[in-house]
Amino acid sequence: MPESLLSSPPVEKPHHIVAATAKALRKEKSDEYGCVSATGMGLCGVIVHKDRVERTIIFLDALATALDADGLQLRPDEMRMKIVVGKDMVAFTLTEKTRREKHIPTEKEQELHKRQLAKRRRAANYKNWDLYMSLPHWEPWPEYDTVYTGQLAFVIDCWARGLRKTWADGRTQSVESMIEDIVTGLKIILANEKTERERREEDERQRGELARRRDLAKKRNEREERRITHLRGLVQLQREATDIKNWLASLPDTAAADIPTDLGRMIHWATARLADLEARTTINAAAAQLEGKALFPEIDELHDPLGDPPEPKYRW
């Protein structure tokens, strides 16, 4: 890392967006590995070694200021940071790289382990098995230590194929020296997010439109079945009327309807049936039967100017 960064004075008054994070980092007690964190409501989700606190604050202050200059605003987001433009958002983190190293027990840890084993031996000698089982026998130290490397990394949290999403300390450069590139990268990612969102929205619109057209086609088919059923009913009635009329015309003159016989009464019934059928198949009757059925509306709400839509490619 450049020497100038190590000697940079602390930021006395950090940018107001990161002020709470700076305060949390400076006040936070470090854990067993020297780590401090600023996570939670209104904080930037930063986790670094205590020795990198001031450097982290310098970076966050510079980043927030640079984003302001481009009309963007850094937003703390509990475990990360983000910027939002309209419907589009890009999230990112600043972390310190770590590595795992095999733990080398200290003299104090070794002495503690010896005392634990000695207590277990005494308990076993006195056959105090309850005490024996209650005493720890494992090594009182972790197998590995987490070592903070001092290398900071700025990572954009998104899927953006082919676009840069990580800036980290190297041999000759630091994340602080790449803030301009980072801001440019964030803007590129935002533009990509917008393009992808618009593509998804257009795909969704097209799927919705295709679903609407398929629904119209289904309803048209159902209506066509009702039309056919209705027409067949009328034709069947008319055909029956014609058949009855032809039958009555074929009867001899001697077959009078008023003859008090079964045949006479049948002829009388058939004549009445014919009259009823003719009344039900007139133009006026046909028009009346169509009322309220919406089989042939003046304005067809089921019409699709593009015709029938394609069938789904896959049917499960």
Image (cartoon, grey):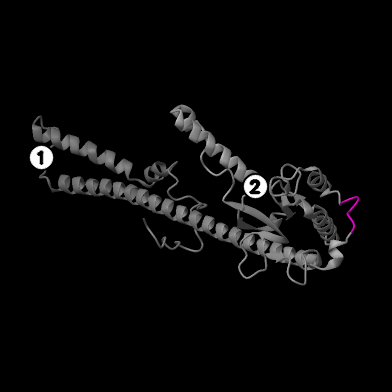
For residue 132, side relative to residue 189 (left or right):
left
Gap between marks 2 and 1 measured at Cα:
131 Å
Above or below 266: residue 44: below
* Segment colored magenta: 9-14
Q: Which of marks 2 and 1 is nearer the N terminus?
A: 2
Of 1 and 306, the residue lying toward us: 1
Q: Characterize the local packing of mark 2: few (<14), some (14-19) or many (20 or more) Cα atoms within 10 angstroms.
A: few
Image x and y of residue 29, in percent = 76, 42
Of 26 and 290, the residue lying toward us: 26
The image quarter in which residue 259 lies: top left
For residue 236, side relative to residue 9 (left or right):
left
Residue 85, can we see it?
no
Q: What residue type is labelled 2?
A: Glu
Looking at the rendered image, the quarter that the N terminus falls into is bottom right
> Circle 1 is placed at which residue position?
255
Looking at the rendered image, the quarter that the C terminus falls into is bottom left
> Circle 2 is placed at which residue position?
107
- Could you tell me which secondary element the residue under label 2 belongs to? helix
Residue 177, can we see it?
yes
Secondary structure mainly formed by the magenta segment? loop
Image x and y of residue 43, in percent = 75, 46
Q: Is residue 12 magenta?
A: yes
Residue at 53% across, 57% down: 209
The image quarter in which residue 148 lies: bottom right
Q: Which amino acid does label 1 sit on?
A: Ala
Residue at 62% across, 44% down: 109
Q: Is residue 137 magenta?
A: no
Residue at 12% across, 37% down: 256
Tag count:
2
Above or below 41: residue 197: below
